[in-house]
Image (spheres, coloured by chain):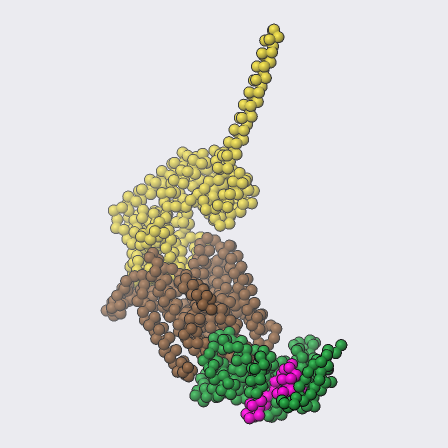
Amino acid sequence: MTVAHRAIAAKRRAAALIASTVAVAVLLAAIVSASARTTVIGQQPSRPERIVSLIPAVTEMIYAMGDGARVAAVSNYDHFPADVARLPRVGGLLDPSVERILAIKPDLVIVYATQKELIERQDRARIPYFSYQHKALPDIMTTIRAIGARIGSSAQAESVASAMQRSLGEIRAKAAGLPRPATLLVFERDPSSLRNVFASGGYGFLHDMLEIAGGRNVFADVKKQAVQASTEMLIASKPDVIIELLYGDSLKNADIAKELRAWDALASVPAVRTHRILALTGDEFVVPGPRVVDATRKLARAIHPDAFQ
Amino acid sequence: MLTADRVTFAYRAGAPRVVDDVSLSIAPGSMVGILGPNGSGKTTLLKMLSGTLTPSAGQLLFDRRPLRDWPRRELARRIAMVPQETHAPFDFTVIDIVLMGRFPHLGTFALEGPADLAIAKQALASTGMSAFEDRPFATLSGGEKQRVVIASALAQSPALLLLDEPTASLDLGHQLDVQLLLTRLNRDGGVTMVLSTHDLNLAAALCRDLILLRAGRVIAQGPADDVLTPETVRALYGVDADVTRHPVAGHLTVTPLARVP
Amino acid sequence: MPPIRTRLLITLTGFGLVLAATILTGPLIGSTHISLSRVFDRTLAFADNADAQIFFIARLPRVLAGALVGASLAAAGVVFQALLRNPLATPDTLGVSSGAALGAMLAITLHINVTAFGVSSVPVASFAGSIGALGIVYALASARRRGLSTIVLLLGGVTMTAFFQALILFTQYLADFADTFRTVRWLMGTLDVGSYGPILAALPIVLVAFALLSTLPRSLDLISLGADAAAARGVDVVAAERFALASASLATGAAVSLAGPVGFIGLVVPHLVRLIVGSDHRLVLPASALFGASFLIVCDAVARTVWPSGELPVGIITALIGGPFFLWLLVRK
């Protein structure tokens, strides 16, 4: 090889070296910045294996999709399915324990959208999270699909959501032709008295369930999820059916028959006159997850006992 | 009328005695001054004489009966007290305050009648405050307030009137007014009076008898002329003073000259 | 000024008529339209008569509860102001309200569900809390000398209030979401008792309190000028102060257990009444009780009609009226 050729070859080698160094640097920078960005936004990895769920409804959704094994910890208020009993607890809506969450070393934390401080801390700790918002009945299916996409179980999620939609559609169809009695759906009140009665308003999944089940919410025109009904409002609303939801602690020591007799004080209410006051127990009524189908069916049976066996 | 026999007061057992082994006797119709520097126990002694404070040791007798045996209201019908200051947190009128003096003469549920109102108005007139009857008490000056409170004490129709520093916050004119008022009440109304003061000249002008109190103990008592001497003034206040009879006023006057080291 | 006898008669008659008017018109007001003729229609069975049920079960108990609570809180306010020689004192000043609130919080959060004398656990616990608070403050104030030291009473009360508030916050923190919601609503105060039971349970306590209070007015006048001055005029100051503290606290405890802590009645009503009748407690005390009852009934009528889609807690209305009124009072002075 001539001297000239050797010089040119050296220059080419240098250029290649510089170019490849720059390329590697750029590539590294791209990778680092990409991972930093995506961690801050809270995405990836695509198949989280250690999920912490602060929302009982979402826990149930994940189990329904068949991915219960990937749940590493739950909230203090999770009771379903039975498997969650052996899982560690990390707090709830008002008091999530950041320490406990970090100790689990999760790769996905499901939080309430309103838990802003918790979300900030997840960002700082670079833990991916999914932000959940509690809304009405149709949103339950939307959330199932979103969760499914997030944890890499889209197909299972789709089948759960479609099945729910089908079942709810069946109940709605069956109730469609039946007369719709005015219904008061009570989810909270002082024990042994009719003070501080909280009933479902015209928004929210309780109202949606009631409508599907063939009842007409007496407070449908109140555009809130919860209505604090005074004695006068209770009498004036003239419900044909009163349904009381009992769950959690209020269920534990309750003498249900005695509690229902508290309504006898309002003798002019049609539901009291015809003894159409029922208690429905179980937390499927207050957890907006896959069990709303069960809950809706039970509501339908309570309102239309003959049509729904 | 009122006697104290070796009366002592301390706030707690073992605490310093505010009033120490004091014996005195108040004759009916007399005008007695309890004279001493601040902190000598005058107010405490006066409160014990009115029955408000119970002595830690010793006895108090009113009309030869132990003070503590007197039912509260009965005692209040005979002994009235004018405190140094009166503060009204509510908007009482002058006549309201004076009518409160009728309390010992009425039962718990009794309301003042025309006779009580007449007595109250009379008391107000004797202190020269009739024009202020419906004025809010809180809007009065210090001297005016003091005269109203004296009227309130007079409305109790007492035989004995106790006054704690009655002219302490008054200017000269009002001081003289109160002096003249008290003299008149004592001389013409026959009200026995005991007043406490640190003002030597007031005591000399007003009181026929004096009790000199220092650090809770009586260092001299008796007619003012006998008791008020340069020696006693020195013992009481640590001041060298000239004590002479005033040519025009007729009573003793005390003029401080120098501090005793 | 006319003699006290005349003024007392006029005061009682005047305020009494106002109260009678509010009690009679109170049940006529509400978010639902009812017809008076239907209400008293004897041909309809009570169980079938919705209008009668609204009148007698929903509204009349509210009006009566309002009268009882309003009278109790206003009278207690007068007494506390005289006892502490301060027109700004309220039934809350000595911690009695906070004690009641803590009792209620504990009952709600710990899910205590015991009924006594036909009354559910929250009112009972609330009353127990108020008496507990009273006991502590009283023991503190009378520990040192004979009689009650006003300063210690005041400081003790303020301290107890702060302490109880801290405990209340702590209890709320431990409570689950539903309980917290319930406690927050309870703290806003409501007169919707829904039956006569709670009223009848509170009534004996209030009657005892008022019986004690009735011996006090003149003594309170005298005591407000100073304990020593009062004693020198023949008042049994120790007994009067004890009666005052006990009766005012009983009345407050009963009121708070019935309706929750309704604020500003004990502060605003005595002031308004003094503007009309003067400062003599023999007029102020009964007038405040009567006017406090009327005032709260009116506030409750507003609370249940002003909001289109529901009812406001009555405590919000009393605060909305009381706050600005109080600022006006301060500016005026």
Relative depth, front residue between A284 and C203 = C203
Percent x, y for residue C182? 44, 57
Which chain is the one coloured yellow? A
Give the image quarter of residue C284. Answer: bottom left
Judge from the rendering whether residue B27 lies leftward or rightward of residue C134; answer left or right: right
Which colour denotes chain C? Answer: brown
Seen as rendered, the residue at the extreme right is: B261
Residue C264, visible in the rendered structure = no
Percent x, y for residue B67? 60, 87
Tell me which residue sits at (41%, 46%) in the image: A134
Seen as rendered, the residue at the extreme top is: A2
Tell me which residue sits at (43%, 74%) in the image: C274
Residue C295, visible in the rendered structure = yes
Tell me: residue B33, above or below residue A145.
below
Tell me which residue sits at (30%, 60%) in the image: A236
Tell me which residue sits at (51%, 87%) in the image: B126
Tell me: residue A199, above or below residue B21.
above
Figure quadrant of the N terminus of chain A: top right
Which chain is the one coloured green? B
Magenta residues (range): B183-211
Percent x, y for residue C62? 37, 66
- Can residue B28 be found in the magenta stretch? no
Seen as rendered, the residue at the extreme front is: B248
Give the image quarter of residue A171. Answer: top left
Relative depth, front residue between B107 and A105 = B107
